[in-house]
Amino acid sequence: MNNPNEIIIIGGGNSINEGIKLGLKDKLKDKFVIACNYAYKHFPYTFMCCVDKDFYIPIHAKNNPNYPDIYEELKSLPLIISINNGKIKEFKHSNTYLLRGCGTYHGKNSLKKGIYRPNLCGLFALTLAHIFIDFKGIIFLLGYDWTIRDKKKVDPKNYKSTDLNIKTHYYSNKELTHRGQGYVGFYENHDPHKYFQVYKEPEVKIYNVSPNSNINSFAKINYEEMFELLNKESYNQEKLRKIIKNKLRL
């Protein structure tokens, strides 16, 4: 198998619903797909990645519905990549690779010096995507919405970081309840360009498949345009995972 030069990353944003309406799930079959967090439940994927220890080990799940208890379910996934922190390491399944995280982007030295950025799964996945296409190819970002509210409709004196009236994910709160549902606090108080501007690899083209996204660091396209741009290559998923594992062993 040739080294892949195209990767699709599935985040969690509401804009993914537009793709679902147009047959996104079928388009993802036999592609190189990174599923962030709960996206593994809904789409074909090559591997899943996560950075939140409470996602992987929901220690409060029995008392707090904001942490769905998926720990046993994760055993059945073909491949998981996460951050090496003490709590996950202690309870790690055999299908999980733990990598060193870093707050600085190190480009082609990322595996040795640390994967940017360990506190945001979307950034962690994007750095991994660069590594797995050897910093040459195309990356499509799905659901990278960086959802925020209209400032005119937010009372700064009674500010709340979570608003369940805001649709932040492509699935409903009833379908899948977790602490990220309706959470906009981080996004309203941080500039996304600060985090995404580090990706300036000369031979990598990044498309944000969300025209209304608040992340303006990359070219924005819609799903019809993405489907036109996708290459015709199909990937054997087991062979892809073998390539990934070999890279992670370096």
Image (spheres, rainbow, N blue to C red):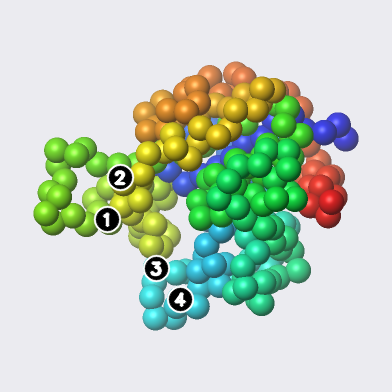
What mark, if any, has residue 66 been given in the picture? 3
Mark sitting earlier along the chain (1/2): 1
Q: Is residue 20 above or below residue 245?
A: above
- Mark 4: which amino acid? Ala
User: SS at mark 4?
Assistant: loop
Q: Nearer the viewer, mark 1 or mark 4?
A: 1
Left or right of 220? Residue 188 is: left
User: SS at mark 1?
Assistant: loop
Per the model, the C-alpha gap separating discs 4 and 2 is: 27 Å
Q: Quadrant of residue 74?
A: bottom right
Per the model, the C-alpha gap separating discs 1 and 4 is: 21 Å
- The answer to which of 152 and 8 lies nearer the viewer is 152
Percent across and percent down for residue 121 are: 53, 51
Q: Is residue 189 above or below residue 7?
A: below
x 38%, y 62%: residue? 179
Mark sitting earlier along the chain (3/1): 3
Q: Nearer the viewer, mark 4 or mark 2?
A: 2
- Dot 3, crowdedness within 10 Å: few (<14), some or many (≥20)? some
Q: Are marks 1 and 2 in contact (CB under 8 Å)?
A: yes
x 72%, y 60%: residue? 97
What mark, if any, has residue 61 been given in the picture? 4
x 35%, y 60%: residue? 174
Percent across and percent down for residue 55 are: 52, 65
Mark sitting earlier along the chain (1/4): 4
x 42%, y 60%: residue? 176
Percent across and percent down for residue 81 are: 67, 56
What mark, if any, has residue 188 been given in the picture? 2
Mark sitting earlier along the chain (4/3): 4
